[in-house]
Every structure is written in C-alpha cells, then in structure tokens.
Image (cartoon, rainbow, N blue to C red):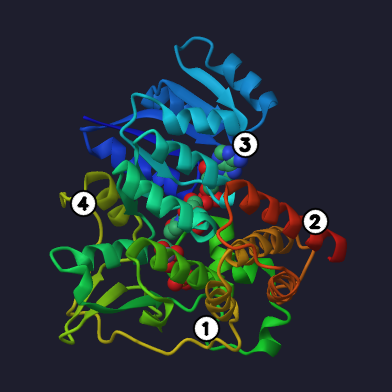
Amino acid sequence: MKNVAIIGSTGSIGTQTLEIVRVQEDLNIVALAAGSNIELLEKQAREFSPEVVGIWSEENAARLREYLADTDIRVVAGMDGLIEIAELSSSDILVTAIVGMIGIRPTIAAINAGKDIALANKETLVTAGHIIMPLAAEKNVAILPVDSEHSAIFQSLQGNVHGDVEKILLTASGGPFRGKDTAFLENVQVEDALKHPNWSMGRKITIDSATMVNKGLEVIEAKWLFDVKPENIQVVVQPQSIIHSMVEYRDGAVIAQLGTPDMKLPIQYALCYPERRYMAGDRLDFWTMNSILLEKPDMDTFKGLKYAYSAIADGGSMPTVFNAANECAVAKFLDRKIRFLDIYRIIEECMASHTVIENPDVSQILDTERWVYDFVESRW
Ligand SMILES: NC(=O)C1=CN([C@@H]2O[C@H](COP(=O)(O)OP(=O)(O)OC[C@H]3O[C@@H](n4cnc5c(N)ncnc54)[C@H](OP(=O)(O)O)[C@@H]3O)[C@@H](O)[C@H]2O)C=CC1
Ligand SMILES: CC(=O)[C@@H](O)[C@H](O)COP(=O)(O)O
Ligand SMILES: [Mn+2]
C-alpha cells in the first residue's frame, strides 16, 4: 500500500489524482488539503477517509470540524496545517497539486520528512529549485514530475545515461492566441484567454498558457528537474498537444512521449513509478491523424518565454520576481483589474526594478515575493 497526501485536492490536478486513487487499489489517501472549497473537501474526506484534512482559513476549519464531527478526521488550518500534512508520519508521497509559490514551505517540509514528491506545483521549483533539488538528493527522496512535458521528458530519459543527453525539446501548444499579433492581444478578454485549445486546467495555469509564461516556468522547471543548461532546452510549438516533449541524445536519436492530452497519465506514472499500469481512455489513432504540426515559438509577441530565459540568466532571486509578478498580474487579470498585455508590463517592470539576491534562502524568497506584491500594488 502506498499512502498518499495531496495539497490542492479540490483543483484540476487534485481531483484527477483522486480519480487515479479510486482505480488503483494499492493507493490510499491519508491527507487532503484545499484553499477554500470546503463543500468538495468534505465530500472527498467522506469518500477517502483520510487521517487529516487541511483548509486555509481558521474560520473554514471551524466549519469543516462541525461538518465532519461524526468522523475521526482531524481538521487543520493555514500554513501550519499544510506543513503538518506534508510531514504526516503515515504518508509515503506528497502530491503538490496546490497552485503558486505558497507550495514552497510544505514541499520543503515533506522532503525534510523523507517523503517522495509527485510535483505538479511548478511555481515552487521555479522559485526554490536551488534549495529543493539538493535537499531532495541529500534526503534521498524522489521528485517525480507530474507536469505533462516534464513527465514526458522523464519517460524519455528512462534507461538512458544523463550524460548522453544533447538537448530537451519542450513542446508548447501555443495557447488560444497562437498566430495572433500584439494588436489582437490588446483587446482579449478573460473568457478568450481561458479557452485553452487542448487542456482543461485550473484558471491560473490556463492564463499562463495564453501568455506562454507557462512555457517559461516550464523551462526553469526542466532546468532544475533534469539538470540541463537553458541553452539546451528548446521550445517547440506542437499545437495539438500530442507530442508531450522529447529528448535528443548525442547520437542524434530523439525519444519522445506521445499521447492524448490527459493529465491522468502523468499523474498515475508519478504515483506508480516505475510501473506502467492500464489506464482506460482514448488512445492516439495514427490512421485518423493526418499530421503532427510543429512550429517555432513567437517570443516577441508571447514574451513569457523571453522573460524566463532572462530570469534564468540573472539567476538568484530573479526567477522569484518573474514568478511572483506573474502570479500577482494573473490574479488581477482574472479579477478584470488589468488588461491581458498588462501581465507582460507588470513582469517586465518588476524584473527591471529588482536587485538580484544571490542564492536566496526561503525567507529571502518570501521577502522577494512580498516586495513584488507591494511594488505592483503601488503602481497598478
Ligand atoms: N491543471 C493541469 O492540468 C496542470 C497543472 N499544473 C500545475 O499544478 C498546480 C495546480 O494546478 P491546477 O490543478 O490547474 O490548479 P487549480 O486552481 O485547479 O487548483 C488549485 C488547488 O490548490 C488549492 N489551493 C489554493 N490555495 C490554497 C491554499 N492557500 N491552501 C491550500 N490549498 C490551496 C485549491 O483549493 P480550492 O479549490 O479550495 O481553491 C485547489 O485545490 C499548478 O502549479 C499548475 O501550474 C501542471 C500541469 C498541468
Ligand atoms: C497539461 C500541462 O502540462 C500544461 O502545462 C500544458 O502544457 C499547458 O499547455 P501549454 O502551456 O503548452 O499551452
Ligand atoms: Mn505543462
């Protein structure tokens, strides 16, 4: 039996993780946590009978304790609650399905407690990869990628020697505005940006796909997960999201993972690694598929990628600034307080106004995040 804890169980990745757990009889839920959706969290708690559930606010925790008063399930709250769940003695693996760099402290706590990590929460690796990867190596815990591209790369690396990798070919859908120009982007609305061509995901990552900030975050995520130089990570637009990513080796061989756009495959692979288990669902049909499209990314219009490469080059706290500015800007865009292109303007201003802190520790990363939020609030 593998005991699983999930932070972010009510979201897109969280609910799909629970779909896997329903089918795989040797996976057992020991803890769940959510932000504010107590109705769904209560339902999940009743179905999966974890030891503990976490919710962000004390007020919601008090309500949830009342709802679950007829059970033995403990209710915890806030960051302390997330950390308690991350460290839970009975768990074997933590699924980080929470959105945003709020995942940093629980992820580090879980690694320190010796838990493997099924990592969906890319913002944590983008901002604290220099702390997390060495710590995971020291504690001998596995960081198993859930993000579809990184799972594809991980799958394409199996059985090969790391030193033989020439480059990573990271695929991108191009998002809902692929092929459009800046003039078009000036007027796009939240609803337009939320129409991802292939994937059904949470709101924040869907906007990130539209700006291609998601791909920028994924370049940084790949750098940390696979220890590759940014110049050896090439982004290729594959608008159908069928090729999930590829690895090119020194002999010119390119190994790819292909499949339908369904996050359950990478989630299950991370939870059951190294086993491949049966999964119901659509299969690729190479007789009906008449082409696989490939394009170069338009980094001048979709500046998310450009900022990411620049943040990597600056290093230190700059990836935190890139990420935090984006988190802040996307929240404002979703609240209809700014326009789509303002997301780029905010990221650019924050990055231009920041003095890099080399090798920041967790408190410096969180201070940098606060600085970004204050800076954005003072100007936008
Ligand atoms: N969705 C996808 O297909 C993919 C997602 N990812 C990454 O996975 C992560 C999750 O994405 P996604 O599932 O789409 O996001 P969602 O917005 O769908 O879900 C986010 C989850 O985090 C929870 N959460 C938010 N704030 C808190 C908090 N303060 N304390 C505890 N829980 C909190 C939410 O709870 P509540 O519901 O109560 O708000 C929800 O359960 C992101 O980092 C994303 O980039 C990566 C690849 C693919
Ligand atoms: C499903 C997944 O992993 C997302 O990160 C997805 O890749 C978003 O698609 P694009 O950013 O390529 O549009
Ligand atoms: Mn992805």
The 10 Å Cα crowd at callout 1, few under 14, some 14 to 19, many 20 or more, is: some
Mark nearer the viewer, 3 or 4: 3
**Between marks 1 and 4, how big is the CA–CA gap?**
31 Å
Q: Nearer the viewer, mark 2 or mark 1?
A: 2
Query: Which badge, 3 or 2, comes first in the chain's sequence?
Result: 3
Pointer 4: what residue? Answer: 279
Vertical arrangement, residue 90 with respect to residue 308, above or below: above
Q: Can you identify the residue that label 1 sits on?
A: 178
- Rounded to the nearest angstrom, the CA distance separating label 3 from label 4 is 31 Å
Q: Residues within 10 Å of mark 4 (few under 14, many from 20)?
A: few
Q: Quadrant of the C terminus?
A: bottom right
Mark 1 secondary-structure assignment: loop
- Within-10-Å neighbours for mark 3: few <14, some 14–19, many 20+: some
The response on whether ligand 1 sits within 8 Å of label 3 is yes
Residue that mark 2 sits on? 374
As helix, strand or loop, the secondary structure at mark 4 comes to loop
Q: Position of residue 294 (x, y in %)?
A: 36, 87
Residue 24 percent across, percent down from the top left: 22, 38
Mark 3 or 1 closer to N-term? 3
Residue 235 at what x, y percent from top left? 41, 81
Q: Earlier in the sequence, mark 3 or mark 4?
A: 3
- The residue nearer to you, when weighing 287 against 180, is 180
Residue 238 in the image, given as x and y percentages of width and height: 38, 81
Front in this rendered view, residue 56 or 223: 223
In the image, residue 310 above or below residue 115: below
Q: In the rendered image of this protein, does residue 368 appear above or below residue 380?
A: above
Circles 4 and 2, Cβ within 8 Å, touching? The answer is: no
Instruction: Report the amino acid beneath label 1.
Output: Arg
Dividing the picture into quarters, in which one does residue 157 lie? Answer: bottom left
Residue that badge 3 annotates: 36
* Numbered label attached to residue 68: none
